[in-house]
Image (tube, grey):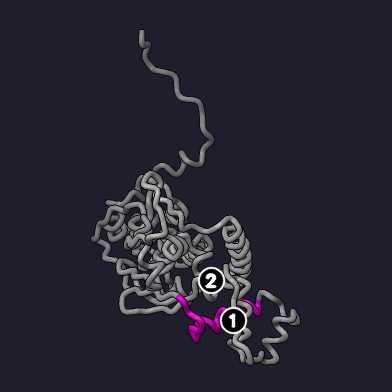
Amino acid sequence: MERVGTYLILARLSLSKVRVPAGDYLSPHLGMALLGTQEPGNALLRCLKELFDESAYSDLTIVCGDDCYKVHKAIVCPRSEFFASACNGPFQEGDSGVIHLPEDDPLAMKMVIHYFYHLDYPTATIPAIDASETVIPQPFTFRCAYQPNESAQVDPATGSSSATLSKKDKKKMKEKERELRRLAQQHSQRSGSASATPNLCLHAKVYALGEKYGIGDLKEFALHKFRAEAQHHWQSDDFLHAIREVYMSTIDENRALRDVVVEVVNAHPELLDQPRWQDSIKDLSLCFDLLMRPRRRRPVSQPAPALLDET
């Protein structure tokens, strides 16, 4: 059965040994994939997609809005610092197997889950942000409902728990993460062209979730998509709304998306002549970023001498 072949390939990513039910057999094409007659990366991606479609062997549920996703710890935990901590730390989520994410955008979270299993996510139109809305971005923090296990001890000074992964398991997680990053980079090169319809707000939201949940390769992928579309759709309303999303959902120190916005607007200064642009960005630090752009690109120089004698 194909699901057995899927399960065997998934076992290579798992941190624990996996048992295959006795009496099950592999289909011919999955058997050949496991024997190496197909390119391993393609076989792995195909099997991940099958797990996504069928939710076979799911051991974790993620709830966001009205959506409920049956996922696999062996897939999401090595990719996300947040989910790894939630499943392995002294939290209620680790015991219940259910993680609720009520504060996140459901469509953006749908793209995150899709990315876990496809190393890509589809584009879709999402509601634009009200250009008059002003929100001060705050640093993201990981939040889980605390439900300490009796066997786990938490250090009050560091917040670390004794219920953490062993060095051997951490090493395995790193190895799996590097392999998935490699596959993600290859897939990004094949699917990095700009779409005909701009989805800049969506990419900005996905990037923010990648930052929030510690999914580094997803951040890079969303940034890649955002940059490609911004260079083609800089005249669109979606780009104007995406600018607000970028500055509302990222902190000052996280400059990846902001730098893309600054470079595109700087390349097309005529945008700033439009009254609607002026009204939309006047309360954003984009104005300061545009002003400081030439200074940031210059090499650091010695401080200017004092104009007046201090004697």
Magenta span: 42-59
Location of the N terminus (image quadrant): bottom right
Furthest-front residue in view? 151
Q: Amino acid at mark 2?
A: Ala
- Residue drawn at 36 percent across, 7 percent down: 311
Q: Decide which of tag 1 and tag 2 comes sooner along the chain.
A: 1
Spot occupied by residue 116 in the image (x, y as percentages of width and height):
51, 72
**Picture coordinates of residue 34, whole percent (x, y):** 70, 81
Amino acid beneath label 1:
Tyr
Is 51 magenta? The answer is: yes
Q: Quadrant of residue 95?
A: bottom left
**Is 58 situated above or below 210?**
below
Residue at 60% across / 73% down in the picture? 17
> Magenta stretch: residue 223 in it?
no
Closest to the observer: 72 or 278? Answer: 72
Under tag 2, what secondary structure?
helix
Q: Residue 24: x and y, percent?
A: 63, 91
